[in-house]
Image (cartoon, rainbow, N blue to C red):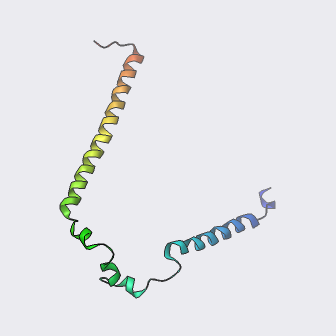
C-alpha cells in the first residue's frame, strides 16, 4: 500500500520549505553583502554607534557587581523552592506512613 502513494507531496513540501528558508534569509541580511565601511575595525560607523557619555560609564567593576547579584539571585531562587519541595515531600511521606511527629 505504501508503494502506491505518490511522492509528489513530500517533494512539494521540501520545495516550499526551501523557498521559505531562502526568502526568510533576506530578512536578516537585507539581501546584500556587507559594505567596506561596516567591515572596517575602527570605522566611522562603529565610532558613532554609542553616545560618548554612555561609553565612559561602563567598567569592569559595574559588570562584576551585576554578575555577583545574579549569582546570589540564582542561588536563593533555586535553594528556597527546592528546600520547600523537599520538606513538603518528607512531610507527605511521614503522613502517608502513619508516623506522627514527636
Q: Nearer the viewer, residue 49 or 90?
A: 49
Q: With respect to residue 102, does 46 lie above or below?
A: below
**In the depicted structure, whether residue 53 falls above or below residue 76:** below
Question: Where does residue 76 sit, x and y in percent of width and height?
Answer: 28, 41
Q: Nearer the viewer, residue 73 or 58?
A: 58
Residue drawn 25% across the image and 73% down it: 52
* Residue 40: image location, x then y, percent: 34, 85
In the rendered image, is residue 7 in sight? no
Q: Quadrant of the C terminus?
A: top left
Among the 4 quarters of the image, the one containing residue 41: bottom left
Viewer-closest of 48 and 39: 48
* Vertical side of 59 occupied by 97: above or below: above
On-image quarter of the N terminus: bottom right
68 w.r.t. 95: above or below:
below
Residue 37 visible in the picture: yes
Image coordinates for residue 81, horizontal then vertical, percent? 34, 35
Please provide percent x and percent y for residue 29: 49, 76
Amino acid at each position: 500500500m505504501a508503494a502506491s502513494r505518490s511522492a509528489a507531496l513530500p517533494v512539494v513540501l521540501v520545495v516550499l520549505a526551501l523557498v521559505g528558508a531562502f526568502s526568510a534569509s533576506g530578512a536578516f541580511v537585507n539581501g546584500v553583502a556587507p559594505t567596506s565601511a561596516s567591515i572596517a575595525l575602527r570605522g566611522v560607523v562603529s565610532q558613532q554607534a554609542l553616545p560618548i557619555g554612555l561609553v565612559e560609564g561602563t567598567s569592569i567593576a559595574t559588570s562584576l557587581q551585576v554578575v555577583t547579584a545574579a549569582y546570589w539571585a540564582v542561588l536563593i531562587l533555586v535553594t528556597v523552592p527546592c528546600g520547600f519541595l523537599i520538606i513538603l515531600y518528607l512531610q507527605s511521606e511521614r503522613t502517608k506512613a502513619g508516623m506522627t511527629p514527636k
